Image (cartoon, rainbow, N blue to C red):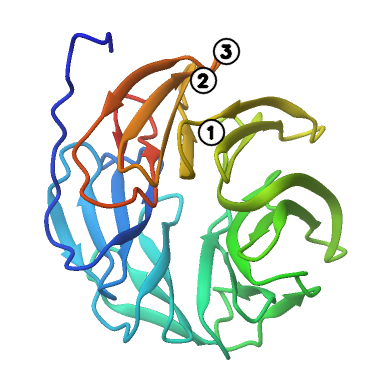
Amino acid sequence: MDKKKIAVPLVCHGHSRPVVDLFYSPVTPDGFFLISASKDSSPMLRNGETGDWIGTFEGHKGAVWSVCLDTNALRAASASADFSAKVWDALTGDVLHSFEHKHIVRACAFSEDTHLLLTGGVEKVLRIYDLNRPDAPPREVDKSPGSVRTVTWMHSDQTILSSCTDMGGVRLWDVRSGKIVQTLETKSSVTSAEVSQDGRYITTADGSTVKFWDANHYGLVKSYNMPCTVESASLEPKYGNKFVAGGEDMWVRVFDFHTGDEIACNKGHHGPVHCVRFSPGGESYAS
């Protein structure tokens, strides 16, 4: 994308309140899909390539803070302010399971093997639900030091990554022991954490910096200062040579991964950008 070309985005209408989370499925035999979470309590599923609306998941009674799809895009999950996390049939839109919590659920993630659902939120507890035994009580991982903002699985479901709303850093938990094995230190709280498709990098956004960490040795690889407070960043998955970031100034910017130079700047949002994500093939990104 050279600077002269202004990219005209596909605009996906439908939500009535701010969109706070986006998640792309991997490429499936039916293509790939994009699910969005909004404060309007109704997550939406779209064709990941065209942005065309497929369906809306109806059933939450509060803002939905986080959404995800399983590896085959057959099930969706959502985390909500109504103190519940739900698992949905992504083909019919039906609720398969509703997991009650004692406070707002901020984050959810399917394990790579699709059998487990991980949740976290204001209760400061990471919970792992076995979707093959949904009636069984969840496994509770040790207390998080703060209110959980983001959760992700890593290392073939051996490690959990989490960040907190009220303190800096990213914590890496050993799933077997349930203990924190490493903390990646940041000054501000991490509002977005993404593991790259090839498993090499963790991309974090905290305050006005975007950082890239070695996902296996946990060292800091790169840190770039951004023009404003950023809420979210995403690394291009195919070649890993650029990343996209968005935040308070309403603009979505593309940067060179190796130098940190700005490559492109897209204007179009009328409010802060809460989430940016690259599609699985890297040919487009959503904000």
Q: Is residue 228 above or below residue 159?
A: above
Q: How many marks?
A: 3
Q: Is residue 45 above or below residue 10?
A: below
- Marks 2, 3: nearer the viewer: 3
How far across and down, in percent of the image, does residue 46 sit?
Answer: 21, 52
How far across and down, in percent of the image, does residue 184 sit?
Answer: 77, 44
Label 1: which residue? Answer: 197
Q: Is residue 99 left or right of residue 276?
A: right
Secondary structure beneath label 1: loop
- Marks 2, 1: nearer the viewer: 2
Q: Quadrant of the C terminus?
A: top left
Who comes first in sequence, dot 1 or dot 3? 1
Q: Is residue 177 visible?
A: yes
The one nearer the camera, 218 or 146, is: 146
Q: Is residue 86 left or right of residue 165?
A: left
Which residue type carries mark 1?
Answer: Gln
Q: Quadrant of the N terminus?
A: top left
Identify the image quadrant of residue 49.
top left
Label 3: which residue? Answer: 258
Label 2: which residue? Answer: 240
How far across and down, in percent of the image, does residue 231 sit?
Answer: 47, 48
Who comes first in sequence, dot 2 or dot 3? 2
Secondary structure beneath label 3: loop
Give the CA separation, mark 2 to mark 1: 9 Å
